[in-house]
Amino acid sequence: MITHTSYAVEPWTLREHELDTGLLPQSESVFALSNGHVGWRGNLDEGEPHGLPGSYLNGVYETHPLPYAEAGYGYPESGQTVIDVTNGKIIRLLVDDEPFDLRYGRVLRHERVLDLRAGVLRRSCEWVSPAGRTVRVRSTRLVSFTQRAIAAVAYEVEAVDAPVRVVVQSELVANEQLPTASGDPRTAAVLQSPLAAEEHHAQGPRLRLVHRTRTSGLRVGVAADHVVDGPEPTRTSSESGDDVARFTVTSLLRPGERLRVEKSVAHGWSGVRSLPAVGDQVEAALAAAASVGWQGLVDEQREYLDDFWARADVEVDGDEQIQQAVRFALFHVLQAGARAERRAIPAKGLTGSGYDGHAFWDTEMFVLPLLTYTAPDAVAEALRWRQATLPAARERAAQLGLAGAAFPWRTIEGKEGSAYWPAGTAAFHVNAGIADAVVRYCAATGDTGFERDTGVELLAETARLWRSLGHHDSHGAFHIDGVTGPDEYSAIANDNTYTNLMARANLLAAADAAERHRDRAAELGVDEEESAGWRDAAEAMHVPYNKELGVHEQHAGFTRLQRWDFAATRPDQYPLLLHFPYFDLYRKQVVKQADLVLALYTCSGFFDEEHMERDFAYYEPLTVRDSSLSACAQAVVAARTGHLNLAYDYLVEAALMDLEDLEDNTRDGLHIASLAGTWTALVAGFGGMRQTGEGLEFTPRLPEKLRRLAFCLRVRGRCLRVELRATAVTYTLLSGEPLTVRHYGEPLALAAGEPRSREVPRTGPRQTPDQPPHRRPNARG
Ligand code: BGC
C-alpha cells in the first residue's frame, strides 16, 4: 500500500519527488504509457532497479495448457497470457566506469512527472556516482496516440562538476527476466522466454528484432532509430544478437555539456504476415515517425489530447485530490482504449500483466460508458472486436448446448480463458453487458450504420443465448437458472436479479433492433416468430422478491441464507477470497461487489424510489467490496438515494484505488474499471446522468464537500456541458443542432450557445446505511 503522500496534488500532473525503490512496482503502473495498442510500464530508462519490467502489445499472448485435477466436459483446455514483448525503453548509461544505477551512489534530486495534457512522462535526476562524478539525466517518454505503432524517448545526460566520459547504450531486449509470480490468483502466470528469435539486425542507428511466440505463433517485430546530438568527439556503434540489439554512443562531456539521444521505437505483430512483411511494417512505422521527428511526435500528442480534454474534461471544485484523480482516471482510460482498434481492452489496460492481460465484462459495463460520451469511436472499435470474436462465442455456446453466442468471461483473443467455471462460464451476464454497450453507444451517437452492421448481430446472438439459457415455467414466467451474477461470492444461483434484468433489456433491444433493420435481421436468420419469442421472454422475466422484507433478492432464496459472520472476520482477512473457501462464501449472505445494487443503477427504470432506498439499505451491510468494481456502483446508488456523503466516500475510494494502492495490487497493473468508475461516480452519481430511450436525463445533486462539478459529454455529435453547483445546474449545448435533455423529468430544449439553468432540489436528512465492520469506506464526505 502507498501509505505516504507519494504524489503531489496538482490539477494536470502526477508528480513524484522522491524515489522509493520499494514502491517502484506500483509507480511503474501509475506512470505507464499506452495508446491501447502499445503499452510501456513506467520502468526507469536504465531498466533497473525495477518492480516488473513490462512492454505489451495488445493481442500478443502466449497459450498454455490449463491444468485440472479433475477434467470435465466443456472445460477450456488452453489459457492465454499476455507476454512481455521486446523492451524498447531501455537506455543504459555508464558514467566514467560506473553504471548509472540509483541503488548506488547518491541521488541528489529525483522527479517524475506524468503530464496529462502533454501525454508524456518526464523524468529528471541528479546523481553522484560512487566515484563522486555528478550527472544530470533527463528523459521524456511518450507512447503516441497519433502513430499507434510508435513509442519514443528523448534522453539527455549532462556533466555537472567535472568532465565525464559517458556511454549510452540504447537497446531492444527480448525475453527479459521477470520476477516470479506470487500466489495471488489475480497475478499473471509467468512465462519465461516466450519469444523465439527469428531475425536480428543493427546498422548505424537502426536496430530491429523479430521474434515469434513459441505456441501461439505470433510474430512480433520491434525496431528503433536514433538521432544523436553531442559534443565532438561523440562516437556511435551498433550490434545485435538473438535477444538484444544495441546502439552505443560514447562521448566526453565537460561540465554543462550534454549528450542527447532521441529514440523512436516501432512495434508490429501479426499472426499471419511473413517475416519480411513484419520487418517492413516496423521499418515503415519508423519512417513515418522520422518524417515528423521527435518534436513532431510531441506536438501531435499535445494536439490529440487538447482535443480530448476539450470534450471530456471533468472539473471538480472543492477537492483538489479528486480533481487530479479524475483527470488521471480519464487519461488512463483513454490510454487503454484510444487505439485498441478491434482488440480487447483488458482489465489492466496495457499497464501490467495482472489477470493475465485478460478482458472481462469490465470493458462494456465500466470502461465503455465513459468512452461512449468522450471518445465514441473507441467504443465502436471495441464492440467490433467483440463482433470479430463471434465465431468463437458461437462455438462456445454450441459446446454448452446453447443457441447464439456465449462470450467468454475472460479472454485475450476471444476464446474462454476461465478455468474456474462457477465464476467464469456461468457468469453469462457478460453477454448482456455487451448488448448494453451496443444500446448505449447507438443511443448516444445515433450511428445507425454501426447498429445495422454490428449492433443487430451482437444483440441477436446474445438474445438467442438468453432465450436458450432460460425457460418459461408452467405459469409462463421466464427464469434463468444456475448462473453467477456480478457478486463472485455467490455462484450457480437461480434468477440472479441483475442478470435477469440485463437479459430482459438485451432481449427487448434485440427485438427492437431487428424491427428497425429488417433486412439485416433476415440475413441473420431472425424472423418475426423468433423476435416475438424474445419479447415474450423479456416480458415474463422473473425477478425474485422477498415480500416480508420488501426487498429484491440478489438471486432466488438469497435473503434466507445464513448471514456471513462479519463480527468474527478480522480486518486482515479481507479480501475474503484469499482467506476462506468459496464453498463457505457461496452459501452465505455476503456480497463481494455490487450486484443487486449494480442493477439499481444499470436497470434503474425497473425500481421505484422506495425500493431503491430499501434495497440499497439491505445490501450495504452485506457488501465487502473485495472487488475494485464495487465502490463506483455504490457511489452512484448512494447519490441517487440521497446519501451524498456516503456517495462521496465511495467516489474517493474508486478514485484513489491506484493512486493510493488501496487493494495492494496496483503493482500488477491499474484497475481500469475503477478508474472509469471515478467518472461514473461523478457524472452518473452526482450528475445523475442516465441514458434513456428518450435521450439523456439528469437528476443532479452535489455533495457538501464540492462547490462545483462540471463535465462535457459527446452526444449525437454535439458537445453538451453540464455545470452543477449546490442549488442550481446549467446545461449548455456548446455546438451542434438543438438537443432536448431532461432535468428531473422536465424536458429542456437546448440550442447551441444558450445556457439553461434549473434549480437542484435539496434532500432531507437520511439514515445512512451501515457497512460490514471494517469495511466502511474512509469518511471524507
Ligand atoms: C471481479 C470481476 C472482475 C475482475 C476483473 C474480479 O475481482 O470480481 O467482476 O471482472 O475482477 O476486474
Image (cartoon, rainbow, N blue to C red):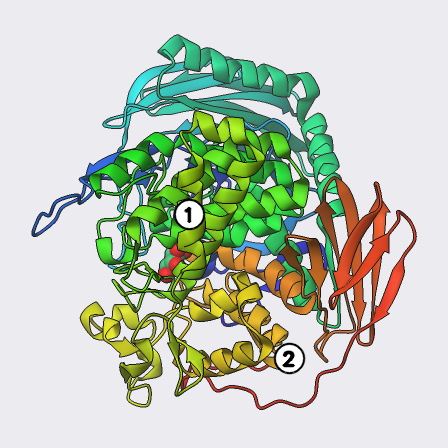
Q: At x 51% / y 37%, what residue is drawn? A: 514
The label on residue 534 is 1
Q: Which residue is the extreme one toward the right?
A: 754
Q: Amino acid at mark 1?
A: Trp
Q: Is residue 564 left or right of residue 515?
A: left
| Count of numbered badges drawn on the protein | 2
Query: What is the x, y in percent for residue 702?
Result: 73, 74
Reading the image, the residue beneath label 2 is 642
Above or below residue 337? Residue 187 is below
Measure the alpha-carbon separation of dots 2 and 1.
36 Å
Q: At x 46% / y 49%, what residue is drawn? A: 506
Q: Is residue 285 visible?
A: yes
Q: Which residue is the extreme one toward the left?
A: 70
Q: Which residue is the extreme one toward the top?
A: 276
Q: Is residue 738 left or right of residue 687?
A: right
Q: Is residue 292 left or right of residue 88?
A: right
Q: Amino acid at mark 2?
A: Gly
Above or below residue 487? Residue 80 is above
In the rendered image, the quadrant that contains the C terminus is bottom right
Mark 2 vs mark 1: which is more N-terminal? Answer: 1
Residue nearest the viewer, comparing 464 with 434:
464
Secondary structure found at label 1:
helix
Q: Nearer the viewer, mark 2 or mark 1?
A: 1
10 Å neighbourhood of mark 2: few (<14), some, or many (≥20)? many
Query: What is the x, y in percent for residue 366?
Result: 52, 54
Residue nearest the viewer, comparing 304 with 536:
536
